[in-house]
Amino acid sequence: MKITRRALAASALALGSACGAFAAGHEPVTVGFIYVGPIGDGGWTYEHDKGRLAVEEHFGDGVRTLYQESVPEGADSERAMTQMIRQGADIIFTTSFGYMDPTINVAARFPDVKFEHATGYKRAPNVSTYSARFYEARAVLGHIAGELTESNKIGYIASFPIPEVIRGINSAYIHAKKANPDVELSVVWVYTWFDPAKEADAAKALIDQGADVLLQHTDSTAPQAAAEAAGDVYTFGQASDMPEYAPKPRVSSIIDDWAPYYIERVQAVIDGTWESTDTWDGIAPGMVRIGEISDAVPADVKAEALSLKNRLASGEYHAFTGPLNRQDGSVWLAEGETADDGTLLGMDFYVEGIVGDIPN
């Protein structure tokens, strides 16, 4: 059944909101954000909320924003979206992969509301998708990791076995291996985006196994703290710069910059030009940035990393360029061949050299 926002307006529910004073007689566009973690996580959700605040600053009284943090990926997210629609939301950004089906479900019931889903692949007339080519930045961090490790053991804290995470593991390993052919990569799956205790335990387990460099695809700073306590372990910020741990253990970072995209899409709603689209941007447009490389990294390694970043940004180099084999030794990409987006978007395999299985 399709339900309009107007039919639900009378039953509006109170939600946490942040908004400027509305100009007299002006109907602001209401923009909602659904977050998988707390806005203070220091990583993924923190950066999305910075984007929300940028929307407020850019549009002033022309918008009001709503947000709900720490929303589980499932039925709870459908309820959160519906509550925002009852508050008059014109567009809702759902900012985690597991919100994909809930977003599609709610969008079907409310065709006059616009939805934007981060990192998913399902669209509808009123649902767009957007993501960033995080694997480009992971190539740069992988290069630094391969150069820095003395034990030749790199640990990777992984969240869920979805293509986005698998792409990142592969990209980091490929470029660490190019920098240091003796590198070994160990992956610990924690099955969460944000759980400081689990992330810390994973970091400690990898350090106990001999890893002296840690990468992560989880959202808290707990691995940085574990590395700092252990000493002589390098880490990288995830989604946000995490500068409080620089210059070591955090020696650089992946930074997600959502603000320009959020401003552009809200402007499209205001202008009446919003359309359902797919967006997958990387280093070149600035959706993915490399955090400051600290002085703990030797100058020559820093120069190599920045050169790699520039070649990725210009299109001179693709992070997945052959020759590359799959984990079982079968040929994936021939010499000079690059991966197509379809394969990358559905990536469900490790490249040759990574030990261990991808969980179901």
Image (spheres, rainbow, N blue to C red):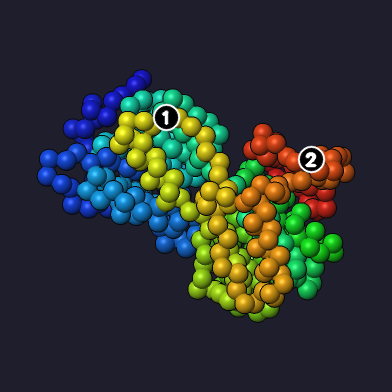
Q: Where is residue 318 in the image (x, y as percent from the top left)?
A: 70, 47
Would you say 211 lies left or right of 285 here?
A: right
* Location of mark 2 (residue): 337
Against 70, residue 83 (above or below) is: above
251 with respect to 25 (left or right)? right
Task: Check the image and name the residue furthest to the left.
Answer: 24
**Secondary element at image label 1:** loop
Q: Distance between the residues labelled 2 and 1?
A: 34 Å
Residue 275 numbered mark, or none? 1
Residue plotted at (32% across, 42% down): 31
Left or right placement of residue 345 versus residue 28 in this view: right
Residue type marked 2: Glu
Is residue 189 something one can see in this rendering?
A: no
Kindly indicate the quadrant of the structure image that contains residue 127.
Answer: top left
Q: Which residue is drawn at 39% across and 40% down?
A: 265
Q: Position of residue 209 (x, y in %)?
A: 75, 68
Task: Say if 70 sits above or below 280 in the image.
Answer: below
